[in-house]
Amino acid sequence: MEGNESLEEVRVELGENSYSIIIGNDILSGLGAALKELPIGEKIMVVTNPTVQELYGDITIRSLENAGFQVVMGIVPDGEQYKSMASAQALYDTAFAAGLDRKSAVLALGGGVIGDLAGFVAATYMRGVPFVQVPTTLLAQVDSSVGGKVAVNHPKGKNIIGSFYQPKLVYADINTLRTLDERQFRAGMAEVIKYGVIWDAGFFSYLEENLHKIKGMQNETLVKIVRRSCEIKAHVVEQDEKESGIRAILNYGHTFGHAIEALTNYSVFVHGEAVAIGMVTANRLAQRIGLLSQADLDRIGLLIAKTGLPVDCGNINKQAMLRKMYFDKKVQSGRIKYILPEKIGRVRITDAVDESDVLAVL
Amino acid sequence: MEGNESLEEVRVELGENSYSIIIGNDILSGLGAALKELPIGEKIMVVTNPTVQELYGDITIRSLENAGFQVVMGIVPDGEQYKSMASAQALYDTAFAAGLDRKSAVLALGGGVIGDLAGFVAATYMRGVPFVQVPTTLLAQVDSSVGGKVAVNHPKGKNIIGSFYQPKLVYADINTLRTLDERQFRAGMAEVIKYGVIWDAGFFSYLEENLHKIKGMQNETLVKIVRRSCEIKAHVVEQDEKESGIRAILNYGHTFGHAIEALTNYSVFVHGEAVAIGMVTANRLAQRIGLLSQADLDRIGLLIAKTGLPVDCGNINKQAMLRKMYFDKKVQSGRIKYILPEKIGRVRITDAVDESDVLAVL
């Protein structure tokens, strides 16, 4: 593939659903060649939005066509509100009109919204067709493109309609991060920091020591953090594809984060910012009930703050927040599961938390 | 379970997606107890239509409530046109309003339309919740409730939106067949005869010899034909859950059948009738190209006719029929796969058929 020396591969081993994550700098022109290795037909529907199409549409289409694929574009307007069943229906129509069959692929070119939506369409068009993720945001590269969670939103809640559907390939070009606005880049960093806290103290230290290189968008550092994040996510997902157990640790910061997003009508914080605040909140809860040391609490908070992410959400109605948390998809039989760090590099899943302690840290 | 002596169990072995099919006469009151064996939460959404609710709603709800479940009803109007995304959306709303979580079950009480729709909702609500099939038609008991195909229709084609999603339990009470109208019962018989032709010459002979008992709705005979049909379907599905190979043999009679249904706007023949005509057409094609003997062709045709099923569809536009066949979901890279019998009990999957031979037998 163009002899690019920094091309890296992470395998996600899930039996017959196994796949590779390819990571590199400036590798988009090699996408078509990489897809030729997969058992897919000649037609590909590229799902993207106008912003990403403007930036990376031409190079993507050219790469696919040069490799002999017929490309059909499925353009969805920008924005989370288009991660909807209505958008899915429009894509089914496009796919059907273009004659896509069971071997045809659906390719997501974009961030999390595009990936989740295109994945849902791939999972449900003709009972499932091959799916390829080409994530162009940091959040998508380190989190949403890996692990097979696909969904659309329901008027009553995010990601209520979806399934687990693994891609055949994830192809992450870190060069696309250069066109990402800074706020979105920092939001993706919240998930990167999350991996350090839940799994790998060494990686957390690496992030502390190399934050300036990350902010400076240095190639090898970006490839390294995307790669290590994907490896950790792969390890976790391999053990628990459908989130019946350990996979829940990936939701560290998310139980609080989702509630914060919902309470502020998704208009104040982007997802990664809410997760950053959620991590800090979870840490304070963990420290309060004697799980986490003050030193680790401070270290995590400092890295989050230095990254430029928010660490609190100002005034919030505590009772309303608690109610929102009970509406999370992860709530089962009325118990909230908290993902709380014991130290940097290790978290615990527990529902043995007093509401009074939760209210105290909100 | 109520000490019913004719209770039979067929296992479908699909690794972590394995499940049992329970078959018996007058066993609906034992449903709740059977569900207590499964790892599901306390809430169950029963999806059904007004006709089935009238007949079996009370006994089902009572059985579930007696076993300690909380029941939420999801009523969908009668008819194939309600196997739609709009119906799915209404069911998502009902599920969400009733507080169904990831452990709650969706239970299909009805025929193929209800099973396919409820299964699609179960597969996609919160990325998949436990699904239970309680099929009340012969077609659903011997075919659509087993094997995990779930779907809704798209304006452009049937079952275009769907997935493979296995139930946790199939619970078939043959007593419900007594309230089925005769035409629907005969239509289900088309699928039963199909199993004999594609897999089991002995079962085909059994059907020939016991047709009067079947028509007389004799308990043990009904249990036997439902059981053997489920066993054969289970064998096939176990080898090829997602229909990448041998599972296609279950489509014997369906390539032609689907096209006949579509060409007649789904208003002349019910599915099983179209499949019956499709089997006869496939047989004639097989005989014409030297695969099937005239004697077996005649035997299959005779059993189909004696069952009271149609064997031809009158005048039909051959070219239009061929075009419809190319629109089938199973078509890949523009080749139609035909499922053709070599003798009673064995079929072959082939795309090596001249269009002239197909046109000759239409």
Image (spheres, coloured by chain):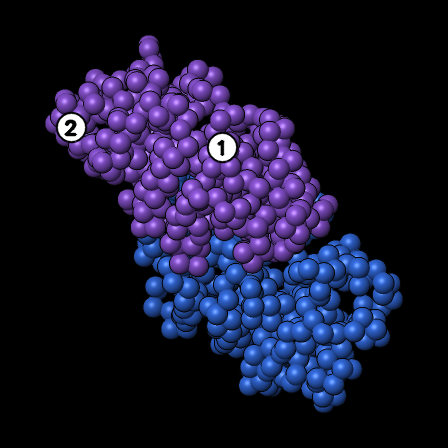
Chain colours: A blue, B purple
Q: Nearer the viewer, residue A213 or B266?
A: B266
> Which residue is most to the top?
B315
Q: Residues within 10 Å of mark 2 (few under 14, many from 20)?
A: many
State the image quarter where residue B140 is shown: top left
Residue that carries the numbered disc 2 in the rendered image: B292
Q: What type is the residue that disc 2 sits on?
A: Leu
Q: x, y (%) of residue A172?
A: 48, 63
Query: Answer yes or no: do the residues labelled 1 and 2 have beta carbons within 8 Å?
Result: no
Residue visible at 69% across and 71% down?
A: A351
Q: Is residue B353 left or right of residue A20?
A: left
The residue beneath circle 1 is B175
Residue drawn 32% across and 57% down?
Answer: A37
Foreground tag (1 vs 2)? 1
Residue ID at (60%, 77%): A198
Give the percent coordinates (x, y) of residue B139.
Answer: 43, 31
Label 1: chain? B
Viewer-proximal residue among B327 and B91 = B91
Would you identify the image quadrant in which residue B118 lies? top right
Q: Look at label 1 and name its amino acid.
A: Asn
> Quarter holding the N terminus of chain A?
bottom left
On the image, the x and y values in percent for residue B1 come to 52, 48
Q: Nearer the viewer, residue A286 or A273?
A: A286
* Quadrant of the rendering where the C terminus of chain A is positioned: bottom right
> Are there few (<14), some (14-19), or many (20+) residues within 10 Å of tag 1?
some
